[in-house]
Image (spheres, coloured by chain):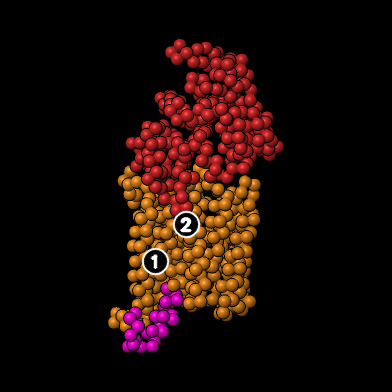
Amino acid sequence: MDRILSLKGVGFRFGPEWALRDISVDVAPGELVGVLGPNGSGKSTLLKVADGILQPHEGEAFLKERSLGDYTRADVAREVAMVPQENHFRFAFSSLEVVLMGRFVHMGLFQFEGEQDMAVALDAMEATRCNELTERPIDELSGGEKQRVMLARALAQEPKLILLDEPTSFLDLRFKKEIFELLSSLKKERGLSLMIVSHDIDLSARYCDRIILLDRGSVYAEGRPEEVLTAQNVEAVYRCPVTVDKNPATGSTRVSII
Amino acid sequence: MRKAVNKGRQQGPLTASRVLKICLALSALLIVTVVFSLMTGTAKVTWSQWWTLFTGNAGVSDPTRLVILRIRLPRVMLAGLSGFSLSLGGVVFQALLRNPLADPFILGVSSGSAFGAVLGIMLGLSFGLGIPVMAFGGALLTMYIVLILGRKRMGMESSTILLSGVIINAFFTAIIMFFITTATDDRLHTMLFWLYGDLSQSNFAESALTGPAVLAGFVVLYCFATHLNLMTAGEEEALHLGVDVRKAKLVCFLVVSLIVGLVVAFSGLIGFVGLVIPHMARMAFGSDHRLLMPVSALGGAIFLIAADTVARTVISPSELPVGVITAFLGAPFFIYLLRKRGSRWTGS
């Protein structure tokens, strides 16, 4: 099967400092990939390279086997959507208006939403269970509600790949789980590829098909969660003593700080 | 709280027909304002005189016809075009710079054109198109400097552009102050009137020149209405959603600076229109630029025609610079807005 995203020997630096070095990562269709690693390990930079916002200084990034450098912003946005960690809106847009922003690349010259755009937006809001929020101003929503709206906006772009940059950072336990459940169901029901940067090791281990563990801008380990998340790997990367066992309720890998 | 935020927003997304309806209503109001303004002034015009003039029949005395068509009409047209451009420029810059205090002058177009105009007055070029040409040249010069200074690293960073504008403003203001302190009496009067905004010297040629340019500028800017909507959510956000942010910014900065530089060259520095009208429009109609842009532009035209009518009648037969009226009305209104709405800058 073709790859949606393929990074080949990618390096990126801010000034003289390399933020990413020799990264080779693939994302297949219908795959949920978790990117883990300590602060400053290059997770967010990796997502920006994958979205074409940052051009790699070394190597190359491919989207559907075509170099990302050959895409316009609109071309990328038809294939890839991004859910940010947090978003501050300066204007009081309603949730529906925010979701309709995702339709930008699909609208015609006159840029007024048609029936098709509305249908896609409402369908996306239903899929992320935020269809009761349509008329609510985005800046009055709770953190969990807001992230569901942002996820709906990503779906409204009708992409093949959704990138998520720590979408659960500011959420409590229930909402964290809800977001991961949602991602998992989107993968199954819509065949979407998803790549999520997160600090929630246990949830990533439970829901992701594959984990990429980053350390100082390089891939330290990659593979199935139980292969990657060994005590040895986690301690080496996060520089913090841990024990790793199976969660008795779910059977997925559990990492506990000692 | 909910109620206040939702005011002015209708259910569902914006449709083209809603934009059209609101614009038609505002256009009607604009026409009423124009007619009222043409009838008002030191020389009174009665309805019957107006009617005969309008229907083309004889019976209107030549002086009245002259006053309306040759003196008031060009002035009303220039006022309308100036208000239209300044207010439109304000909306666009507020969105581009994500700053509620941005106005069309914030990038230094004002002080640049003022420098050109004042220099022209000093050099004794106060004839024909001498001053406007100097002013427009000054506006282009500052725009060029600001964009060169702001064109750093990843495209054009808003904060760098903003700072460049502020610094250019300060520099040119110093030169203008130098000119003013060394100017003779008659030239000083010309300078001050220009600096406060003055529409009394209008003629048809000016409107014929600015009109098509301003309308073309509006069409170009309107093509970027949704781009602006997305860019208010953040530049990186807009990139993710598929906006070519760099291109949108460059085109919008250029077009606004050009049309604002053009009207400023003829009408001088008229403050507050580009600040107050966009905020009023946002309060009344929400923050979707597809509606906000035409509403602000038409609102600016109506406001400035009305303000200029006041400027030329309030101390009749003498008159005030129109900038005095707009600031006099605009400043208290702005303080009221600030107190009522606090520091929050949420549109509708």
Q: Nearer the viewer, mark 1 or mark 2?
A: 2
Left or right: where B162 falls relative to A10: left
Q: Quadrant of the C terminus of chain A?
A: top right
Looking at the image, is A148 positioned above or below residue B74? Answer: above
Amino acid identity at mark 1: Ile
**Number of the label disc, if any, that sits on residue B302:** 1
Mark 1 element type: helix
Residue at 45% of width from left, 36% of height from top?
A: A155
Query: Can residue B16 be spotted in the picture?
Result: yes
Left or right: where B335 falls relative to B129: left
Within 10 Å of the Cα at label 2, are there few (<14), some (14-19), or many (20+) other Cα atoms? many
Within 10 Å of the Cα at label 1, are there few (<14), some (14-19), or many (20+) other Cα atoms? many
Q: Which residues are magenta?
A: B54-76
Q: Which residue is mark 2?
A: B222
Residue at 34% of width from left, 42% of height from top?
A: A135
Residue B293 image offset from top left, x and y in percent: 44, 57
Residue at 55% of width from left, 41% of height from top?
A: A76
- Is the C-beta separation of discs 1 and 2 under 8 Å? no
Earlier residue among tags 1 and 2: 2
Residue B232 image offset from top left, x and y in percent: 48, 47
**What is the drawing colour of chain B?**
orange
Front residue of B326/B328: it is B326
Residue at 61% of width from left, 28% of height from top?
A: A25
Query: Can residue B103 be spotted in the picture?
Result: no
Amino acid identity at mark 2: Tyr
Looking at the image, is B39 positioned above or below residue B5? Answer: below
**Chain letter, colour red in render:** A
Residue B313 image offset from top left, x and y in percent: 38, 76
